[in-house]
């Protein structure tokens, strides 16, 4: 059975760079990037989910969390259809050492690479950023 998945993602910036994890769609043979965050559990607000996910994925605390948008994302991943409602939040990491290194580390629960992605790479077509519409939203915000 297919269902819509609610997500909370954190838009964390370092100048013109965006904190992302790196994923791979093996069916399509493409590498993509997405802000960190994850599924919203029943009874949990999107903001609570964001805090929990950053704790689980990076052992990181967030501050200045503010919802900026909601995007709907209908996609295909590994040959299967998906549908997400994505709550996007700007936030800052309380541990400032994350901002000092380009390679931040890995997602603790799955080992995906976490790094700062130059938005110029996305604008120039050198990197794929999901969810669809996020790059346009961020460039409109300046």
Image (cartoon, grey):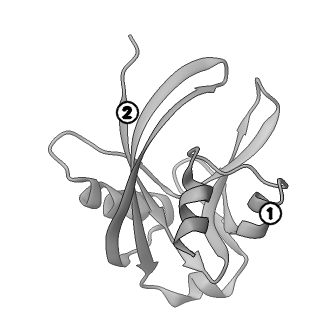
Relative to residue 131, is residue 9 drawn left or right?
left
Q: Secondary structure at mark 2?
A: strand
Query: Which residue is labeled 1 in the image?
Result: 121
| Visible residue check, residue 57 | yes
Report crowding for label 1: few under 14, some 14 to 19, many 20 or more residues within 10 A (C-alpha).
few
Quarter assignment of residue 21: bottom right
Where is residue 19 drawn, in percent x and y?
60, 68
Front position in the image: 106 or 32: 32
The residue closer to the viewer here, 6 or 62, is: 6
Secondary-structure class at tag 1? helix
Image-based side of 46 in relation to 99, left or right: left
Residue at the disc numbered 2 = 5
Please state, as top left, top right, bottom left or bottom right, where the C terminus lies in the image: bottom right
Q: Residue at x 67, y 74 (%)?
A: 17
Which one is earlier in the sequence, the residue at label 2 or at label 1? 2
Give percent across and percent down for residue 29. Answer: 82, 31
Closer to the camera: disc 2 or disc 1? Answer: 1
Distance of label 2 from label 1 (alpha carbons): 28 Å
């Amino acid at each position: 059975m297919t269902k819509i998945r609610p997500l909370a993602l954190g838009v964390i910036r370092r100048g013109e760079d965006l904190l992302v994890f790196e994923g791979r769609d093996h069916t399509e043979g493409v590498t993509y990037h997405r802000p960190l965050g994850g599924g919203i559990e029943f009874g949990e607000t999107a903001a609570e989910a964001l805090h929990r996910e950053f704790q689980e994925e990076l052992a990181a605390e967030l501050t200045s969390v503010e919802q900026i948008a909601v995007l709907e994302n209908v996609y295909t991943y590994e040959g299967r259809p998906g549908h997400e409602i994505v709550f996007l939040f700007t936030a800052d990491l309380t541990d400032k050492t994350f901002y000092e290194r380009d390679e931040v580390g890995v997602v603790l629960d799955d080992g995906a690479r976490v790094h700062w992605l130059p938005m110029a790479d996305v604008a120039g077509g050198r990197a794929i950023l999901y969810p669809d519409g996020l790059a346009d939203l961020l460039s409109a915000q300046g």
